[in-house]
Image (spheres, helix red, strand yellow):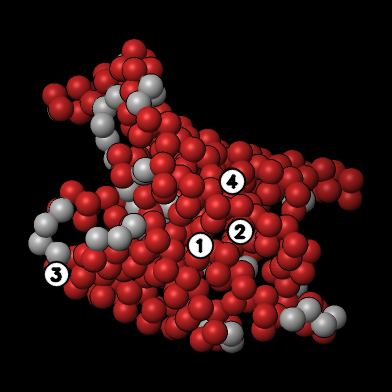
Amino acid sequence: MNRLADALSRMFDLGLTGELLGYPFVQQALLAAAALGLVSGVLAPLVVTRRMSFAVHGTAELAFTGAAAALLVGVSVTLGALGGAILAALLLGLLGQRDNERDSVIGAVLSFGLGVGVLLLWMNPERTANKFTLLVGQIVGVSSADVTLLGGAALVVLVITALLYRPLLFASVDPEVAAARGVPLGVLTPVFSLLVGTATALGVHVVGALLVMALMVTPGAAAIRVTASPLKATVLSVVFAETAALGGILLSLAPGVPVSAFVTAISFGIYLLCRWIGGMRINRLTRGSAAATA
């Protein structure tokens, strides 16, 4: 209890938080989180609409595997995570074309990636702290080179998403009609999987491989609870993701708690609030329709 009380008291130590904000590694982490929040916020409504939440989890496991491999050979963890996530996206996009086999493909890829990642960590007996950060994230590990790489990858994902947004949205909302209208679903599915994989890999440094769904899924799930407009849902999702990512870092600075604990808490709180607002709106519309009918 004393440790919990101490952590809670330090959480709101604005002086210490302000002091830590002057450190370059904190500023770099905030830039990385801002890039991640923007990309994940844009993609999250599409991920939820396309029912790819489980796919994000599977992609995160291979991102973790790639990061563990990079840690073992001594190269950039971000590059390793990107490589693993892209491999996962290709596997999920190519092997999971049919809806009835998608879950089984994701399960196979997820278990494979996690097993190989555990093996790679076992082969690397040193850097135990770095092993932990692959799972739950750590802002100390974000370097200026990582920020540059993350920013470049985020820009590429955003540009491709903007170019393909209309057919992606059409295929997400009604894939059968989209296919009948000539939308190339066989191309869009693996391309979108690559975009999701890249964005998922960006989150390994900030929130870790285990909890990246807090930014890749939850903001979109919250946004579509309060609006049916794709544009408004995307804007809200970006706001929610940025709030969770940046707010999580700010709250974690003084107590020294892993960032993912606060990111997930903020994301879940936003989701519960939006779910309540959406429920109230549905009840109000239902009462209005009943009154008009009567």
Q: Earlier in the sequence, mark 4 or mark 3?
A: 4
Seen at 67% across and 75% down, the residue is 188
Q: CA distance from mark 2 to mark 4?
A: 10 Å
SS label for mark 4: helix
Image disc number at residue 38: 4
Q: Position of residue 234 (x, y in %)?
A: 68, 49
Q: Secondary structure at mark 2?
A: helix
Compare residues 140 and 49 and report the one nearer the observer.
140
Residue 80 seen in this snapshot: yes
Check disc 1 and report its element: helix, strand or loop.
helix
Residue under label 2, please give it: 157
Name the quadrant of the N terminus.
top left
Q: Position of residue 136 (x, y in %)?
A: 30, 50
Quadrant in the picture for residue 276:
top right
- What is the spatial separation of the Cα atoms under label 2 and label 3, in whole angstroms? 33 Å
Q: Residues within 10 Å of mark 4 (few under 14, many from 20)?
A: many
Using a 10 Å C-alpha cutoff, classify the residue at mark 3 as few (fewer than 14 neighbours), some (14 to 19) or many (20 or more): few
